[in-house]
Image (spheres, rainbow, N blue to C red):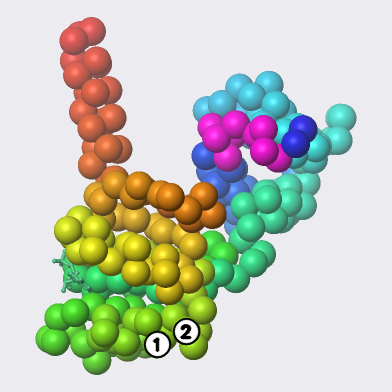
Amino acid sequence: MAKDSISKLVIRRLPRYYRFLGDLDAMGITKISSRELSERMGLTASQIRQDLNCFGGFGQQGYGYNILDLRHEIGKILGLNVENKAILIGAGNLGKAIASHLNFEKMGFKLIGIFDNDPQLIDTKIMDIKVSDIKNLEMFCEKHKPDVAVLCIPKSAANLLSEKLISYGISAFWNFSHYDFRLSNQNVIVENVHLGDSLMVLSYNLRERNEKQ
Ligand code: NAI
C-alpha cells in the first residue's frame, strides 16, 4: 500500500505498538502472535494484522512477530532512526517539564536550544541546555539550522512568532500553545497537543458511564 494512503488512525496507533513492544522486550519476550499482542493491547488480532500489513506485514504464519525486528521496523516507519534538530520556545512551567522529562533522542529528535524572553530565565540551564534570549533566535537558526520548534509559549506570542520561525527555516512545530496555525506553506507540518482535549474525552466517558448506572 502506498504510504500516502495509510490512514492517520493507523499512524496514531504506531507509537503505541512501539511502546508495547519495548515493554515486551524489557520483559525478555522475544516473539509474540498477533492474538497475544491483541489481548495485551486491547485491539483485535485482525486489526493488528491489518495495521501492520499497511507497511508490508512483518509476521510469519505460525510464528508470529519477532519483537525486536517489529519494533525496529515500526521505529523506522516513525522516523525514530533520524535525528531531527529541535528548539524549544518558552522556558516556563510547561517548557521546563517537557525539556526535563521527555527523552527527545529516543523519539528521533535532539533538543539543541531553548529560548525565552524573560530576563530572569535567560542564561539559566535546563538539562544542561542554556536558555537563550529570543533575540538570538534568528542568528541561532542561521548557524544551527533546527528543523522543529516546540512551542510552549502563550497563544498571543505564538501568533507573533510563528511566521518568523518559518522564515528562519523551521518547517515543523510541536505546538502546545493553543495557537491555530493557518498555513500557507504546504511544507510546514504542525502537530498540535491539547492535553485538555484528552481530559474532555475522559469527562465524556465518565458522563456516559454514570448515565448508564
Ligand atoms: P509559563 O507562563 O510558565 O511559561 C510561558 C513562557 O513563555 C514564559 O517563560 C515566558 O517568558 C515565555 N514567553 C512568552 N512570550 C514569549 C516570547 N514572545 N518569546 C519567548 N518566550 C516567551 O506558562 P506555561 O504554564 O509553561 O504554559 C505555556 C503555554 O502553554 C500557555 O499558553 C498554556 O496555555 C499552554 N499550555 C498548553 C497545554 C497543552 O496541553 N497544549 C498544557 C499546559 C499549558
The residues colored magenta run 3-11
Distance from the alpha carbon under mark 2 to that under mark 1: 5 Å
From what the image shows, is residue 26 above or below residue 31?
Answer: below
Identity of the residue drawn at 61% across and 61% down: 80
Identity of the residue drawn at 26% across and 84% down: 135
Q: Say how many tags the image has.
A: 2
| Residue furthest out toward the right | 61
Side (left or right) of 6 relative to 212? right
From what the image shows, is residue 84 above or below residue 40?
Answer: below
In the rendered image, residue 164, in percent from the top left (x then y), is placed at 34, 69
Identity of the residue drawn at 56% across and 26% down: 43
How packed is label 1: few (under 14 Cα within 10 Å), some, or many (20 or more)? few
Q: Is mark 1 within 8 Å of ligand 1?
A: no
In the rendered image, residue 111, in percent from the top left (x then y), is placed at 45, 75
Whether residues under marks 2 and 1 lie with C-beta atoms below 8 angstroms apart, the answer is yes
| Numbered mark located on residue 139 in the image | 1
From what the image shows, is residue 25 above or below residue 123?
Answer: above
Q: Amino acid at mark 1?
A: Met
Q: Is residue 191 visible?
A: no
In the rendered image, residue 62, in percent from the top left (x then y), is placed at 86, 30
Side (left or right) of 51 relative to 133? right
In the rendered image, residue 58, in percent from the top left (x then y), is placed at 79, 40
Secondary structure of the residue carrying numbered label 1? helix
Q: Is residue 143 magenta?
A: no
- Residue 81, by quadrant, is bottom right
Residue assigned mark 2 = 142
Front residue of this view, candidates 213 and 157 = 157
Magenta stretch, overall SS: helix
Side (left or right) of 159 relative to 50? left
Regarding ligand 1, which quadrant of the image does it lie in? Answer: bottom left
**Placement of the N terminus among the 4 image quadrants:** top right
How packed is label 2: few (under 14 Cα within 10 Å), some, or many (20 or more)? few
